[in-house]
Amino acid sequence: MSMQIQNIKAGSKNFNINKNKQISCKGAREVVRALANPDSLSQTLVLETSVTGGRSAQAYKRGGFAEFRERFFDDVLAALFWMKGVDIFNKLGDKFGKHVLKLPTTEFDVGKDALRTPFENLTANVSVDMKKKLAGFKFTKIILSTLLATTFVGFALPKINQAITCKMMGKREQNKEKQHTLNDKMLAQNSFESFTKKITQSNQTSFKGLSGLTSVAHLLENNRLCKMLTTDVGITSGRFATARNKDEGLEYLFRDITSCFFYYASTPLIYKGLQKISNSSKLTTLDPVAAKSVHKAMLEQLKQADGSYAAMSVKDFLSKTVGVLDDKAKELLKKIPFESDVISLEKLKEVITDEKLISKAKEMAKLQPEQAGVGAVLTRQQVADVLKNGSINTPEFMQDVYKSKFGKALTDPKRFIPMKKITAFRDNIDDYAKAITDKAKDGKVTKELLEKMNKKSFIMSTGFRVLGLAISALALGIAIPKLQCWITAKRTGSNAAPGLREYETDNNKS
């Protein structure tokens, strides 16, 4: 995903100023949504730009052009491979699987829960041997893609950088070091070949092992903590191992370990802290794009036939928007035999016989792909929406707002989205409505209140997000590089770059 910046003109589709001078900017909401996604490229680009600029400036201040060049070269290429390296190697692996191994497909997810089973959907009509080959291929591809990206950033890139500096400084590598590096490469190559050979021996893979391979592959591909451990730990270890001396290695350890917190945890923690301080969690958890869609649907409930807007009591407003479960619906919901909060449409028909509700359930089930051997399925939450009559829990509205949030993956039978993520998003919609009614004066919901709360939600979400990213960026680009240099100066008694020390010594001798 790339961030595109378009020219904004008054009166365009993306930027409008109405008679009340209220600003509606669709593009801005999309940007904030992207920045709120920890897996988006947009958030990473913001942080990496700060990291590269800050580290390079500090490097120039301490070690002049030589350290600046090393730092800039390393950060730019490392950021590229850290962000896209695994994806690039994955795509190369897909081509290898299709054209060399002749696999029927290579692009699929292997995550699984009660709602989505992409691997089972994919392999429903293939042989047992092919299931094993697909599982083994997926696991091997992800492992090798991660190892290749990590090896380049952690081991190869530092050596390349050092070689360039060595050439620029007029110093040649010693034969012993060259031989040592060659042996390391040969050892790594042999390890890769041995590893690949063992993994791809699919005929020896049991069904128990098959499940294990898909589970590990899913974690490495989708779990942020696992991705961090398999990339950052490997990269940091490589940089430490290839450092030119102990002091340079310790600088790498300190910088990379402390940076992890600000890459992965600080922004969401700051966001949640600001939500708690402002008591705005219900209003600001739903992303701005979805909040705008919900706002429009709610606004329609206040609209009269003549186009005017009338105030509505909180009770009527909630009934007409998010809907309520009456006593009969609650009793019916209790009778439904859910398994892990999911039920098939066919089993649901055994409990619900009303044709209108069944028709609504069929449409609601389209929020996720059918499961192989089971057919259409619904969650407990979706069945509850079927039994309500609110405007924002209709299948049509849900499909529109969910597709906007999750894209084509929502209904792709080969893609996986965790059910808890879907459920949380739906809960956020109800929370947003509750935040509005909590602020209703005299128990009345008005157009002015809806517009005020939607604007407040967008401003606070944007402000919290920008502040969180700004603090993380300052820490990564300024605080950590300065502290890193200060610690080295205190430890060694010298403010020189540890990696360039040998060149300074040679120059002094000469």
Image (tube, helix red, strand yellow):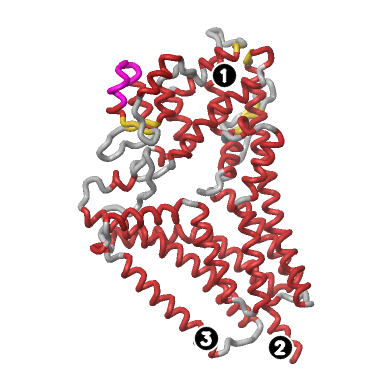
**Relative to the observer, which residue lies in front, 390 or 474?**
390
Amino acid type shown at disc 1: Leu
Where does the magenta region start and end? 348-358
Where does label 1 land, which residue? Answer: 299
Question: In the picture provided, is 30 more to the left or to the right than 101?
Answer: right
Tag 1 or tag 3, which sits nearer the N-term? 3
**Secondary element type, mark 1:** helix
Marks 3/1: CA–CA distance: 71 Å
Where does label 3 land, which residue? Answer: 178
Marks 2/3: CA–CA distance: 20 Å
**Secondary element type, mark 3:** helix
Residue 506, numbered label: 2
**Relative to the observer, which residue lies in front, 298 or 216?**
216
| Tally of marks | 3
Q: Is residue 196 magenta?
A: no
- 109 relative to 249, above or below: above
* Residue 268 picture quarter: top right
In the rendering, at what x and y percent does residue 337 appear?
34, 28
**Secondary element type, mark 2:** helix
In the rendering, at what x and y percent does residue 250 appear?
66, 72
In the rendering, at what x and y percent does residue 30 appear?
56, 38
Marks 1/2: CA–CA distance: 74 Å
Tag 3 or tag 2, which sits nearer the N-term? 3
Amino acid type shown at disc 3: Lys
